[in-house]
Image (cartoon, helix red, strand yellow):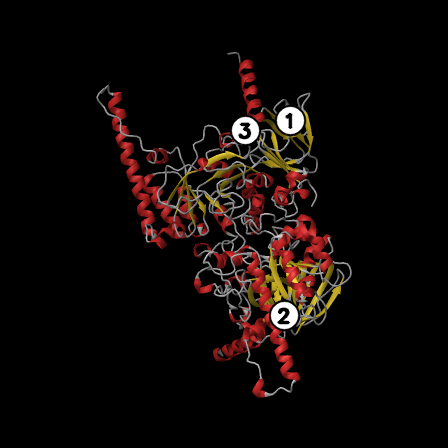
Amino acid sequence: MRVLRLALCFLAMAICALPVCAQKIAIIADHVYTMESGAQGGPGMVLINNGKIEAVHAGATAKAPTGYEVYRAAYVTPGLIDTDTTAGISGAYNIPHDQDEDEATDPNTADVRSLDSFNPNEILVSYINQYGVTTIQSAPGPKNPIAGRAGIFKTRGPQSPAATADQLAMRAESAMIFNLGDIPKSTYGSAHKAPMTRMKTAEIIRHALSDAQAYQQKWDTWKKEGSDASKQPSRDVRLDALLPVVNGTMPAVFTAQRADDIITAMRIANEFHLKYMLASVTEGYLVRDQIKNAGVPCLVGPIMQRLESPQTANATYEIAALLEQAGIPIALMSGYEAYVPKNRVLLFEGGIAAANGLGMEKTLRAITIDAAKILGIQDRVGSLAPGKDGDVALFDGDPFEYTSHVLGVFVNGQLSYQRK
Amino acid sequence: MHWTARIGCVFVLVGCLLSLSSGMPAQESASGGTLVVKGAKIYPISGPPIEHGVLVVANGKIVAVGEEGKISVPAGATVEDASGKVLMPGIVDSHSHIGIDPNPLVADSGDANEMTGPIEPALRALDAIDPADPNIRMATAGGVTTANILPGSGNVMGGQSAYVKLRGTTIEQMLIPGTIGGMKMANGTNPKGYGRRDLAPMTRMEEAALARGIYEKAQQYQEKWAAYNKAVAAGDKTAKAPEHDLGLDPVVQILEGKRIVHNHSHRADDIMTVLRLADEFHYRVVVHHGSEACKVTDELAKRHVPVSYTMVDSPGGKLETINIDMSCPGMLEKAGVKVAFNTDDPITPSRLLLRQAALAVRGGMSTDAALKGLTIYPAEMLDLGDRVGSLQAGKDADFIILSGEPFSVYTHVLQTWIEGQKVFDRSDPRDLRYATGGFFEAAHYPSLAEGGK
């Protein structure tokens, strides 16, 4: 009997350890925010089957079909999407053991990938999952002008089964991260290395992109001339990494705080015809007309970043509202923190944006469907629509209220966190 | 002197002081007469909330608080209608570095940590506080009216803190008359910074030994003075006064119970070291930050040692804060430990101090304890409980007007008043910037300086 029970137990564990658990879930809520078109916040029911959203039924009298495990909540939203964070590669302990976000040995580390630093068991990944965050773009840190490639991952919660970084990755290489402003020049300049100035930071980026273009041409010429194996150009991993950026198939993310750094990012991106977005954009409201005219989306945040640095001293809690009102596509991000708190929580950042001009529903858009669209993953996440991943967050009140609680979080239809 | 003449004198004096505060934004003066704020839901803290309350203020002091219709409103008073709004005492921040770690914080401006010696009792925060620091106005935008501005936590004994009101253009105008401030101490990770330079302290053992050393020295100094005073009292004209010691005088004030020790401490074992030292030398102490205080609730409760808690958004950033948890303040409350919330500005922003208490409610604390943790409890931790922290007749007229319930994310601080003077008004575009941000841009983008964004 005991053996049988043990065997059943292992079987159950094995089933649930699969990427998708074949469980049927019904979530009944007073306020359902599908983030699809149409009115939001009415009563309804979300059905999850086989890890995917099966259906969303509107109406207060919704009763769960048989065979479904039922969860109830006041508010239900899609799992939240953090568009730019170092969670997973910059750990909570903040000791060399768990700090893998900045390869500050060379200002150009285009060839590195956050995937190869990503620790699926990191405390902070589980922590943000408990606040409804189910998808993150985990990006290399702020120190290098060309910092490397970000990846998009699902999060694990305290109740999630074990998983590898590769299993959590939705996109192993989602974007190339570029950093402007004070941090690269203070990182290297203090050791009398380049960059020591903003001029050099821009030059390093421009140089690398120009080299990548030349490298592409070399390969194109070689192919045009018959791909003679004896004349094949030698491979360069760093330039290989930059090829999709100069070819416009991989977005470039430019992290910039000061208005002039934002303009520099746009100048470089235009020169090389990059597909790009701006990140952080602390002073973005001062140049919002230029950003709007360029049609470039902004990853905004962290809204509660400290103002001590001269390049963040102009930060405003109204940044998301000001950019949104200008007609700029926005999503929120939690970014990187070097000290306490080690990680910003997207849900809390959203609260400050919501209370400072953006409002509840638009803020929710900026951390769900609009975030998914900007990252190009809206076919899988960002709204509660049939066929999308079963990523859902349950709340006992307005998600942004300080005193509300996250009741539960589903990732791929699996319960990753449930409030005790 | 006849009593009316005496009041007249005080009146003139108050008027003088107020006219000195020219660095503050334009404000309506309530000193010239009586101010009545009516219609708001009032949280007096000293009693249950009043749905339609009236607050009467004169000469910078609270004259009366009560239900509309039950309070006599003096004729000729300036009436402020706050219907539909919420009014509560000004927030007391028991741990802040505004003015001493100003904004922007660069090598030239930061003055919180004198990292040249781990025991620095002679240092005074007030000698390094810049009243022009925009962080101070940001704090008033968050509803903070009283603050304990402390030296940093790099030293075992970092220096004397300053108890201030957030008004005035000089530190003398900010200091609360009659107060001598507290003493900053720290243990755990931060003072071990010396170890990286092969200096003491390199271990927690040495931190405690250094603390014990200064208290023992102060005890001996105290005894020397006691012997001298006794000899003088006995008529001994040959008695020679001991030399005054700038550093030991404030430590003796700790031993005499006149100066409270504000001890930065995160880990449970570090908190126990704080308690052990306070037990040995019988001094009054507040545990600051207290990230793992909920692991030693009974030890704190039985000694009546309060905690000034710093709520941050995620665990870690340093090893000793890895167990930080939103449920901690509520657990301390249940154990009978008084909890205040502090900003530790610039670690958390002063303009969001209400948020910290709200998150404690999310973690299980009662609304009542959370409100007290922003007002009367921190006031008591600074020995200012008879002066600020609740709305009672005779106390300082420090209050804030909110757009809604204190613990809603959508609530904004609309006005902040200190001793009957308005120091922040969200409807003024120049003040609004200190609540939302972008105040720094005026220096860089003059065309945007006035209101427009």
* Residue at the disc numbered 1: B35
Q: Amino acid at mark 3?
A: Lys
Label 3 lies in what chain?
A: B
* Residue at the disc numbered 3: B395
What residue occupies the far right of the structure in this picture?
A: A38
Residues beneath discs 1 and 2 located on the same chain: no
Residue A9 or residue B231, whichever sits in front: B231
Q: Amino acid at mark 1?
A: Leu
**Could you say where residue B119 lies in the image, as x and y percent from the top left?**
35, 43
* Residue at the disc numbered 2: A245
A175 left or right, relative to B238: right
**Could you say where residue A44 lies in the image, as x and y percent from the top left?**
73, 62
Q: Amino acid at mark 2?
A: Val
Residue B379 or residue A207, whichever sits in front: A207
**Could you say where residue B143 lies in the image, as x and y percent from the top left?**
59, 39
Residues beneath discs 3 and 2 located on the same chain: no
- Label 1 to label 3: alpha-carbon separation: 15 Å
Using the rendered view, name the quadrant where residue A11 is placed. Answer: bottom right
Callout 1: few (<14), some (14-19), or many (20+) C-alpha neighbours within 10 Å?
many
A6 vs A156: above or below: below
Callout 2: few (<14), some (14-19), or many (20+) C-alpha neighbours within 10 Å?
many
